[in-house]
Amino acid sequence: MIPRLRRLGLLLGVATAVILAGCGAPPAGTTSRLDPNSVPYGLLDKPKPTQQTVTAPTSLPQRIWFVRSGRLAALTPTGTLSGGQTQQANALLVELLNGPNEAQHNEGYESALSTGVTVTVREVESGTARLQIRERRDAGRPAADGPLAVGQIVLTVTSVPGIDSVLLDDGTRALQAPLPGGALASRAVNAQDYTPLITVPDSAPS
């Protein structure tokens, strides 16, 4: 009787092993590797690190150019700039023609432009701004008195991105621009023409 039971048990064990092998289950005491492609919904994927977007502070390039110690010196505009190139340039010119405020004046900033002058950007075409300069008859001295005055205008207007040069007129005819050294330019002038007059930047108020 006992031998028969042993044979029956052996047969059942063999049958069980065959069934488990047919079902794909690994034998006891062994390990198997899962195919990552067979796991749904990406459950085996490693979590991706969270990326944080950091916005770096930007500095606006526009500047107002005054005169300090006989040299051209830049200040950050105090007003808000908006609109296109023409609007921005005219807003800068308004602040320029208003002259330094009290705090700036106390720091030694002044203007070489006559108090009776008006300067307006009429249009900007292909990077060149066309400016109209006019003055009151009782202004007492020329509107753009020499290279410092014209340099203030040119450097201020060309600080607007996309404006590279300036042409001057008085509403009826083109004006020659005085350059450092005494020459007169009948062409469009740019910031590089007036760099010899620029002072070294320091801790000036903005």
Image: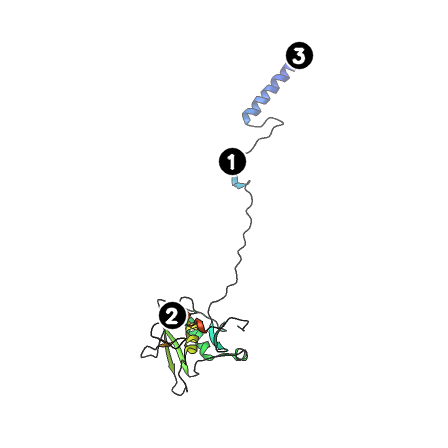
Q: Which quadrant, please, contains the N terminus?
A: top right
- Residue 3 — which label? 3
Dot 1 or dot 2: first in sequence order is 1
Of discs 3 and 1, which sits in the foreground?
1
Q: Secondary structure at mark 2?
A: strand
Residue 194, position as x, y percentages in the image: 42, 72
Q: Are marks 1 and 2 in contact (CB under 8 Å)?
A: no
- The answer to whether 201 is drawn above or below residue 21 in the figure is below
Q: Are marks 3 and 2 in contact (CB under 8 Å)?
A: no
- The answer to whether 41 is drawn above or below residue 8 in the figure is below
The amino acid beneath tag 2 is Ser
Residue 142 image-quadrant placement: bottom left
User: Looking at the image, which residue sits at the far front?
Assistant: 181
Residue 48, position as x, y percentages in the image: 54, 47
Dot 3 or dot 1: first in sequence order is 3
Cα separation between marks 3 and 2: 111 Å
Q: Which residue is mark 2?
A: 165
For disc 1, the neighbor class at 10 Å (few under 14, some 14 to 19, many from 20) is: few
Tally of marks:
3
Residue 181, position as x, y percentages in the image: 40, 76
User: Looking at the image, which residue sits at the far right?
Assistant: 2
In the picture provided, is 70 more to the left or to the right than 13? left
Cα separation between marks 3 and 1: 46 Å
The amino acid beneath tag 3 is Pro
The amino acid beneath tag 1 is Ser
- The answer to whether 80 is drawn above or below residue 106 in the figure is above
Identify the residue at image location x=48%, y=76%. 71
Identify the residue at image location x=41%, y=79%. 146
Q: Which residue is mark 1?
A: 38
Residue 97, position as x, y percentages in the image: 44, 79
- Residue 136 — which label? none
Of discs 3 and 2, which sits in the foreground?
2
